Image (spheres, grey):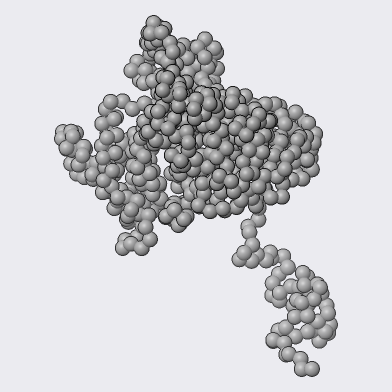
Amino acid sequence: MLETPLPPGLEPSAETNGSATGIFSLENILGENHDAVEHPGKSSAEEAVGWDEEDAEVPLADGYCVECEDQPAEVLCETCTDAYCEVCFAAQHRKGSRKHHPYKPLANNAKLKPNGVVSEGNRDEAMKVDGADAAEDSDDEDWERVIPGTQMEITGAQPAVGEKVGEWFVDRAKYIPLRLTLSERKFLRLLEAALTVSEYTDKIDTIGFGLSKAKRIVHQIRELCAIMSGLLLSADYKRGQELFTDRDFQANAEFYQTVFELGRRHKIMNPDKMRTTYGKLIYLLQDSQMPEVKDLLNFSCVMPIKTVYAILEEHNAVELLRDELITVATKEIYSEGRPRRDVQKDIKSKERAIEILSSRYATNGLSQEKVRQCLYSIGDNHAFLRANRDPCERMIVYLKQYFHPTSAKDSHSSLAIRSGKGGARLSHDHNKQYSYVLQSLTLWREILHDMFHLWSLAEQDLLSENVPYRLRDTGQGLNRVQASPKTSRMMHNILHKAQKSVGTWIGSSVIHMGDHNVPNALLFIDKYTQIYRILLPICNALSQVPVLAQKPAIRSYIDDEFGSVDNCIREILGDFFRHGFDGSGADNFFDAGSCIDGRLTSAWNWCSSLEKKRFFPVFLLSGFIGFDGEW
């Protein structure tokens, strides 16, 4: 048998015949002691690092979570011997063998009590989930007991009149944008007009173009600023002439920053406004934060959002937010079902409280009008919560009122769904579907309660100089895929809060962020600002059914078709709770299921099929005109 000659330098040593340890020979490389082989000329003290090897890990700072590394550690897992923050511990130990690990709170966390091994609780059969979510849930039970501890208080509305306000208004005011004044609204209309005619995203988010992307961005920003300059000149010739005599964009940077900030502030306070122009604005500002664009543009387009807390803190008037009169000055006044005299009395008491507070906290730098503006802004926040968050609370009340949590009386009051029937992609019995709907509505309520905070973090992620985006085809066209660490962290906190409040969690807890499902924080925020467009028309229609039944002809129709008013309401709710939360609505089976965003997708899918339901005439009789109309 012929032997293949070895390459020069790899022949066995004559003395050891290649058997000695540490000699760089083919026999030793292929042998059992290959770990001890040293390259000739390479010192053993030198560390060999390959192109694909990661850098040495930075040691974790003492007292911080081993998972996220940016939050203080609160829980010590006795089996893993690792310290976690409460959110990461719940996420890592919610399934499989890890959920049986004993744990104990650390000294700096008095909220949790050492309960030893987490109780297993009641178990049900595994939920059948298609696609990506099925991969996560296929090996473990989907009905999970959340880490026991003190029940977190359900976040509610503002403190009632007469209650001690504590720090509630201080915490909220940090993220409540300041209401626009009349003069600022003129500039807002100017910005909207300029963005409406702009083709920014059409020319920037495209593949293959003449100029480099940085030069294209600068050209489009300058073009938008020029349009705004022309509009201002035509509206106020004297001011426009003074501001743009030399056409120096850098010299007028403060004006552009102010106008762009007005648009952002207005959108946060009014999510139903600027539905086509806000995306252009935020993408324009996102591109303006790129270092190469800043160098070419010579100024930054971004400035912080003006909030109620920032204005009051600047003038040392934060105590306004702790004054007990603030509950009267910012409360919403309802007229439904109340005599006119009571409504007028509430209006006068509110106006009196506003005047007292504005005169009490006005200083040399803070006028009474500015204090009123801050109070009106807090009132706008309450109006936002009423229109967006309260429908979730009303649907939870309907769920508990018309359906039993563990058993159904008959098929009409059963919420059970089966995969493949009626378009459903999940299989739940009545008990599990009831809990699944309840936890989904609770999660939506918590998200909308903290929406202003989430929006602030989303803009920080979108406009970050350190987190670039990639232009990718996500299956729905070219989108800017960008990680959103701050928004994601806040969402995990909200999810953990919702999980503890309901006690159990069914299905997947995956939060899509920065992938093909939810490319960036802008689209994430846009998804959850649409919840009221789904729930509010349904709540309005249900509230009108008893009123409609007072008319003999309509009452006859309801009795003949549904049996009674209660049966009509129960059928509408039952269909929504079954097929608005059945995992359907995605383009393929890989994107369907029970993930956090998939629940909202299923609800939108139910809305698109409302015309096919037999109770659709009831919606029309109640004044329903669509899920994108005015209510």
Residue 316 appears in view: no
User: Where is residue 401, by image quadrant?
Assistant: top right
Q: Position of residue 453 (x, y in %)?
A: 49, 32
Looking at the image, how many numbered discs can be counted on the residues?
0
Q: Is residue 482 above or below residue 261?
A: below
At x 79%, y 84%, the residue is 13
192 or 285: nearer the viewer: 192
**Image quadrant for the C terminus?**
top left
Which residue lies most toward the bottom here?
2
User: Where is residue 55, by image quadrant?
Assistant: bottom right
Q: Position of residue 504 (x, y in %)?
A: 68, 34
At x 44%, y 30%, the residue is 618
Q: Is residue 289 above or below residue 444?
A: below
Left or right of residue 131: residue 79: right
At x 32%, y 55%, the residue is 203
At x 16%, y 37%, the residue is 234
**Image quadrant for the N terminus?**
bottom right
401 or 535: nearer the viewer: 401
Q: Position of residue 544 (x, y in %)?
A: 44, 23
Residue 454 appears in view: yes
Q: Position of residue 417 (x, y in %)?
A: 61, 41
Left or right of residue 585: residue 400: right
Q: Is residue 527 above or below residue 572?
A: below
User: Where is residue 39, by image quadrant?
Assistant: bottom right
